[in-house]
Image: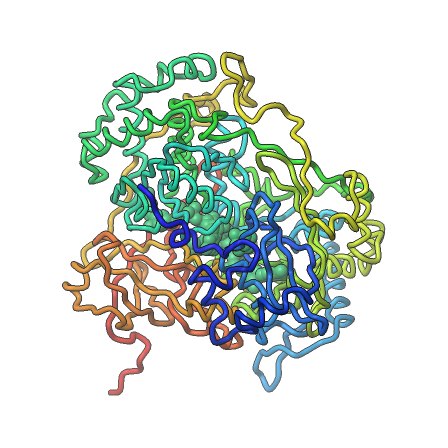
Amino acid sequence: MTTSRRKFIKISALGIGGLVTSTSALNLFGKNSYLNNKTALNITQNLKKTATYCEVCFWKCAAWAHSDEQGNIKKIIGNETDPHCFGRLCPRGTGGVGMYHDEDRLKTPLIRTTINGEETFREASWEEALDLIASKFKDIKEKYGAESFALLKHGSPGKHLEHLFKAYGSDTVAEPAYAQCRGAREAGFNLTYGSWIGSPEPTDIRDTKCLVLIGSHIGENMHNSQVQEMSDAIDNNATIITVDPRLSTAASKSQYWLAIKPATDIALMLAWMHVIIKEELYDKAYVKRYTIGFDELKDHVENFTPEWAYGITTIKPEDIRKTAREMAHAAPAVIIHPGRHVSWYGDDTQRARAMAILNGLLGSWGRRGGFYFKESISVPKFPHPKYPHPKWDWRDIGEKFPLAQMGITTEVIRHAIPSKDNKYPVKAMMVAGTNITKSIPNKKLLEEAIDELEFMVVIDTMPMDVTGYADVVLPECTYLERYDGIRSATNREPSIAVRVPAVKPKYDSKPGWWIAKQIGERIGLGDFFKYDDYKEVIEWQLKKMGTSLEEMEKIGVKHYPRKSGPMYLVEGENHEFPTASGKIELYSKELKDLGFDPMPLYTKHPEPPQGFYRLNYGRSPMHTFSRTANNPNLNDLKSENNLWVNPKVARIIGLKTGQSVWLKNQDKITSTFSIKVRVTERIRWDSVYMVHGFGHDNKKLSRAFGKGINDTEMVTKTMIDPIMGGTGMRGNFVEILTEDPHKTVEI
Ligand SMILES: Nc1nc2c(c(=O)[nH]1)N[C@H]1C(S)=C(S)[C@@H](COP(=O)(O)OP(=O)(O)OC[C@H]3O[C@@H](n4cnc5c(=O)[nH]c(N)nc54)[C@H](O)[C@@H]3O)O[C@H]1N2
Ligand SMILES: Nc1nc2c(c(=O)[nH]1)N[C@H]1C(S)=C(S)[C@@H](COP(=O)(O)OP(=O)(O)OC[C@H]3O[C@@H](n4cnc5c(=O)[nH]c(N)nc54)[C@H](O)[C@@H]3O)O[C@H]1N2
Ligand code: SF4
Ligand SMILES: [Mo]
């Protein structure tokens, strides 16, 4: 099967930033463009190239920002030697320049004030805003202890602020990339192999013969090198098996699309294990040498036949058998992809365990075309005094969840609500680079918690919804206007990349490192920030790493040789896995000892009642979460989300493509805005689907305000993973309303 690479990957062409070849990238330079193709190509020679890495998502592709003599950024192009992007940026990365140009950006610090009885923001100087924040830092520490000041963060600015918080004495830190994203996968694979999957995933997709995607919608999920490698795998006739209730882009390129009934994946995987073991298709030598618990697993899956799974998943027994054989046929060059956003149904660590176990049976961990042993190089720490030891931190806040390995945002938020048994009161909060009103569900609880805070400061580049709740808003400059920490990539071989400002910060915006330092100095922590410019930190680190800023400015990415040994297991040799037993744990004693199932079991989850549909959500290749909805370039490509509705459902309700509808969920929450219907066979009749990140409710976002529905608003029921505290968000059911529920009725 051959597929046109260009159609699938929608990543810009090498070297010229996608101006000519790819239709999607071409559209980037549409009516809101800063350039047209011809001028772009002509002026390339006169542009200054600055080394950076992209912050439009967390794949962190290394890139070259091109700016003209007037200091305007004209375009951004992938760094050819970068293993995250192989010289091509995805449409979002190419459109990243829109983050810099967006005229709706935060321009000055803002302080909440009351005018004529109404709360509003007034513009303030940095001096005033920073002094106010510093006084609150001192206040909170005196009254409650530094621990009561929490930091919710995501992305590069988070690193600088985490340093400030640790110096101050608070490790009450969390980010949505754990409990709302990949935490359960890390827990599940850690239990099995003794190590996290991490980012980028060490999936050897370019050499695989069979890629199994369970939900992962690579191609819409645009994690760059992964998409490119999948495209190569397709060209090399690898078998793609996609398990998804929706015909995703990946499913449409697959030999097998298993349109599973939502929330039943564990049953499918147990049946796959059953077939693989019953038909003796597993890698016997690998299982014998590297794993423990095979006999227990064999007994465990004895009754989980494809016929049993059929009743649960709606996938035909012969399809389950056929796909299990396909995987075994390709093994060990097979990947049961661990997924990334896995906080679905609350039994997510167990679903990740099932994926990990399947890989173990097929012998793909540590094998070419399966999972490689990743390696990175550590960046030396710039010297600073020892951090004080907090009396309590994110671990205590998440203590209910024995295998939580990072802060749980929802728990940190919940601890802002006073109660008798709240031993760890959160009294103030800094939110940096995360739009929590979009990324954390259960808005009622969130608003209740925010209401209780004595102080809240938000650091963002844009007037996102979350800024509306702050006492002080600080405008950070964009990634194109600042130095940041060195990117050390975990990959087939180690490499580093630098981020150097391509232009001066626009308006009165400042870099995150500067903000952290300014607050630190004001509260007596100057010794933790012994530099005038973050450039000095990078220069010091690069020197220790055998290079220099001067060299890095020329090359952008530097590669280092592997030191940890071969990328794959050496045939016939033993290998010590970093688990308690030193083996791949098919049976987990650790889980058993903690009172959990030592091997995954299928549990039935509630199904939508009559008239309701399961709310399913995912990614658009043109957008990242809520952060790009207002980006002029990307908004031009896609300005709102749509509601995917099966034709059967459309017939019942009488819906047509393009019609505006509202949603009402099981807890009677109605959507603030409407969404346009897209009638399509590509979604099962029991679910509806939309892209996450739209439905913005801050009017200051002139392009994004009121466009589409915010899926998070409809997520009021969550299913919590008891093992690591993940927030399962896919158990919400919605009704489709054809009339505006907000229309005032005239009597
Ligand atoms: N363009 C773009 N790319 C991105 C991002 C972005 O914002 N924009 N964000 C990045 C980040 S941080 C993450 S974590 C990843 C997320 O990307 P993935 O990890 O790929 O996300 P998933 O939630 O697994 O994928 C959503 C898919 O799951 C399917 N699905 C829903 N319910 C079920 C079910 O019960 N079973 C199965 N088998 N499938 C189901 C949906 O139909 C949809 O196709 O994307 C990354 N890449
Ligand atoms: N309902 C629902 N919830 C989800 C998801 C979902 O699919 N559906 N996905 C989950 C996943 S996988 C993840 S990883 C999280 C992502 O959660 P978030 O990281 O919170 O995602 P965004 O909504 O993009 O919010 C990022 C914020 O950072 C700001 N920002 C961007 N660049 C900078 C910068 O350089 N400096 C500063 N200071 N701010 C910046 C943006 O303007 C925006 O306000 O959400 C999770 N929550
Ligand atoms: S995948 Fe796209 S958005 Fe993400 S870092 Fe790379 S170019 Fe930027
Ligand atoms: Mo994520």
Is 690 placed left or right of 18 in the picture? left
Across and down, in percent, residue 37 comes to 53, 69
> Which residue lies at the image location 68% right of the left edge and 70% below the top edge?
68
Question: On the rendered image, what quadrant is the N terminus found in?
Answer: top left
Across and down, in percent, residue 657 comes to 24, 68
Answer above or below: position of 316 versus 695: above
Answer above or below: position of 248 versus 314: below
> Which residue lies at the image location 52% right of the left edge and 20% below the top edge?
569
Is 379 placed left or right of 585 in the picture? right
> Which residue lies at the image location 52% right of the left edge and 35% below the top edge?
202
Answer whether residue 440 is visible to the viewer in this image: no
> Which residue lies at the image location 36% right of the left edge and 29% below the top edge?
600
Q: How is the structure coloured here? A: rainbow
Q: Residue 300's quadrant in the figure?
A: top left
Answer above or below: position of 362 versus 485: above
Across and down, in percent, residue 634 comes to 48, 66
Across and down, in percent, residue 394 comes to 60, 44
Is 658 placed left or right of 386 in the picture? left
Q: Nearer the viewer, residue 528 or 15?
A: 15
- Give the quadrant of ligand 3: bottom right
Q: Nearer the viewer, residue 576 or 206?
A: 206
Answer whether residue 432 is visible to the viewer in this image: yes
Question: On the rendered image, what quadrant is the C terminus found in?
Answer: bottom left
Give the number of marks.
Answer: 0
